[in-house]
Amino acid sequence: MKKALKKFILITLIILIALTFASVSNYAATGSFSVSTSSVTLNKGETTSFTITATNCGGQFTITSSNSNVASVSKSEVWAENGVNEGGAITITANSAGTATITITANNVSTTNPPSEVTGSKTINVTVTEPASEPEPTPEPTPDPEPEQPSTGSENQGGEQQTGETYTFSTITIDGTKYENGDTLTVENDKSSVRVQADIPSNYSISVNGNSVSGFNVNLGEGTNTIKVTDLSSGKTITVNVTRMPLVEENTPPNVMDNTEVSENTVDEETAEDSGLKLEKLTIEGLELIPEFDPDIYSYTVNINMDEQDYSSLNIDAVANDYMASVGIDGNQNLQEGENIINIILTSADGEEIVTYQLIVNKITSASEVVGETTNEDNNQKMPIIIAIVAIIVIVIIVAIIVLVRKYKKMNPDYDDYDGYGLYDYDLYNKQDDNSDNNQNYEDDNPYKFNNSDEETQDSEEYDYDDPIQDEGKKKKKRGKGKHA
């Protein structure tokens, strides 16, 4: 009985350990995927790359850009299975200044053992900036010409003797750039003067709008300034019109939403330029953003319980920190059950800067839950709980077996004499025989006593193999017979 019970306990433990290992391995095999980066900043014209890694799963992944004018990707679909995606890294190219969101979505991806669908998406926030321009070299100042004395034509401005060579007066220089007769030039309002010179050997005069100018610096008024340079020797003139832009008073147009709603922004222009184009406010009527709104966070999750209230579109209030920027919303129509993507696109007044915020809207019912991938981090957090539960079950079973064995021993005093094979311990009987005056009772009481030689012969034939227990039984029978002969 002892040996049988030990075998039972051992087999039970092996089965429990095997079940524990199978359940843990099965749980740990939950599929997931990741990308090698979550955000990147590039200069216009630069490129970078990323990879997709699949863990315990395989399938097709789609790759999209929220604004391909800002950042485009080299591949729209890749295959990844239990490792890095096939075909090498995916390249992101920075096309123009602004921001874009690269979205990687699991499309027909599943685990192999046990088979289960893996869904969800990952995003990469891309910021593209204009490359820093190198400062233009400062032109060396041209020395003022020496005062010209009345000349008979034999001396030039520098006082050198004329050699009789002719010269051509066809251009003048304004701030280091040559202009021909009839050319026009436009400058910003903050440009209040220009420097005018003529590269000729004779004296010349400068006038602006018919007024003579002494020196080379010509003051500009708002509007058109007609600059005329006259060669005093030949009388030839060159005229260039320089237009100085008027001071523009900034208008304050409202932000225009895609659903024709208008929202006002009171942030002053100077603050907007310092902080960059962003949202300063983002709310959704009746719903909560996860995480809470932060201008520097570009992706949010919104959960809608369809049992409480269904939404086909959201009432989104999005306000930019630049009152001249426009705010457009894409994807906020006909929201379906499951995952929906809404993009909020900010565009600066000059169109040079574009910023995209993303809303992931999950419409669920009480009978369903938001489907998503289980990450390895979640597995690691839950794994100790599973192991602890299985260990407690194993300990309870072992304790129950021990209690049952002890209870059985109390109910069966001869339990320790039984060897599990139907034979009692003969050594115990030998001890009783030596300490008892009625040794003959041993033979009578022994239920395995051999009654005659025929039975002995029969037993010998039946136990023809070498069995130490049977041999010991035979010897004891012979000793009993000898004592009573």
Image (cartoon, helix red, strand yellow):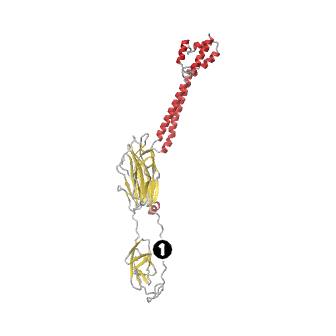
Looking at the rendered structure, the kind of residue marked 1 is: Pro
Residue 110 at least partly seen? yes
Which residue is more in the foreground, 440 or 27? Answer: 440
- On the image, the x and y values in percent for residue 300 come to 43, 51
- In which quadrant is the C terminus drawn? top right
Which residue is more in the foreground, 462 or 223? Answer: 462
Q: Residues within 10 Å of mark 1 (few under 14, many from 20)?
A: few
- In which quadrant is the N terminus drawn? top right
Which residue is more in the foreground, 94 or 476? Answer: 476
Above or below 167: residue 462: above
- On the image, the x and y values in percent for residue 408 come to 55, 23
What residue is shown with label 1?
Answer: 139
Left or right of 66 on screen, residue 160? right
Above or below 251: residue 206: below
- On the image, the x and y values in percent for residue 372 come to 43, 45
Mark 1 lies on a secondary structure that is loop
Above or below 401: residue 51: below
Q: Residue at x 54, y 17 (%)?
A: 460
Q: Which quadrant of the structure image shows residue 267?
A: bottom left
Kindly give the residue lying farthest to the top in the view shown: 485
- On the image, the x and y values in percent for residue 475 come to 60, 17
